[in-house]
């Protein structure tokens, strides 16, 4: 029993002494300055201001004129709209296009200005649409890059309302 008590006391003393030694050593350590790190570039320098990916006027015109073609059903134009078009959306758009044809509002002409990036894979442009029997209408339209530039879903809805009047 005495051996157990003695061993326990010695262990406690060793732990306490070790902790004191560590504390004393920590006080005597002087911090050194962190080494300076210099970036190293192998090959080409980094661009100072990377250019955002924005579509060309031709790319946007291709989307708009593709959607405005009254001879092609919207079920075949689904690839031009973000997320595609469902059956009901295509039928609704076809009905609006037939109405626009009957009212003499097509063919449409588009003028695109002020193309600016609005985020990764997105751009906005001021688009003016004109057509016979229809006053010039300018709207900010958003396009998204989904394996090619497409009209954003919200902008597609906005454009269709032009024919709903």
Image (tube, rainbow, N blue to C red):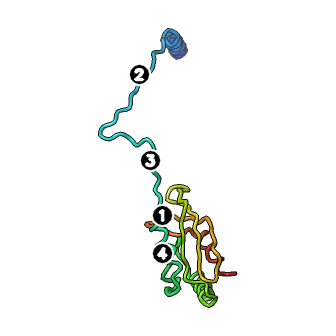
In the image, which is nearer the foreground, mark 3 or mark 4? Answer: 3
Q: Position of residue 47 (x, y in %)?
A: 40, 43
Frontmost of labels 2 and 4 is: 4
Near mark 1 (Cα within 10 A), the count class, few <14, some 14-19 or many ≥20, is some
- Residue 160 lies, in percent from the top left, at 62, 77
Q: Residues within 10 Å of mark 3 (few under 14, many from 20)?
A: few
As drawn, 126 above or below 102? above
Which badge, 3 or 1, comes first in the chain's sequence? 3
Decide which of 127, 1 is in the foreground and name it.
127
Cα–Cα span, label 2 and label 1: 44 Å
Distance between mark 3 and mark 2 Cα atoms: 31 Å
Residue 10 in sight here: no
Choose top left, top right, bottom left or bottom right for residue 154: bottom right
Nearer the observer, disc 3 or disc 1? 3
Task: Provide the residue designation for mark 4.
Answer: 79
SS state under label 1: strand
Compute the Cα span from label 1 to label 4. 12 Å
Q: Earlier in the sequence, mark 2 or mark 1?
A: 2
Q: Residue at point 64% right, 80% down?
A: 134
Q: Which mark, by number, is residue 145?
A: 1
Image coordinates of residue 102 in percent, x first then y, are: 62, 91
Is residue 36 positioned above or below 156 on the image? above
Q: What residue would you read off at disc 3?
A: 50
Residue 48 appears anywhere in the view: yes
């Amino acid at each position: 029993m005495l051996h157990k008590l003695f061993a326990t006391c010695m262990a406690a003393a060793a732990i306490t002494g070790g902790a004191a030694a560590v504390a004393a050593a920590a006080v005597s350590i002087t911090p050194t300055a962190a080494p300076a790190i210099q970036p190293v570039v192998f090959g080409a320098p980094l661009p100072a201001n990377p250019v955002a990916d924005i579509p060309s006027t031709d790319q946007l015109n291709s989307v708009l004129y593709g959607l405005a073609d009254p001879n092609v059903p919207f079920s075949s134009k689904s690839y031009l709209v973000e997320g595609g078009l469902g059956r009901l959306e295509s039928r609704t758009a076809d009905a609006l296009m037939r109405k626009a044809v009957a009212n003499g509002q097509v063919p449409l002409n588009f003028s695109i200005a002020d193309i600016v990036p609005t985020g990764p894979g997105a751009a906005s442009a001021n688009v003016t649409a004109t057509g016979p029997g229809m006053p010039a209408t300018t709207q900010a339209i958003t396009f998204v890059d989904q394996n090619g530039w497409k009209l954003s879903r919200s902008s597609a809805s906005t454009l269709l309302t032009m024919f709903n009047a």
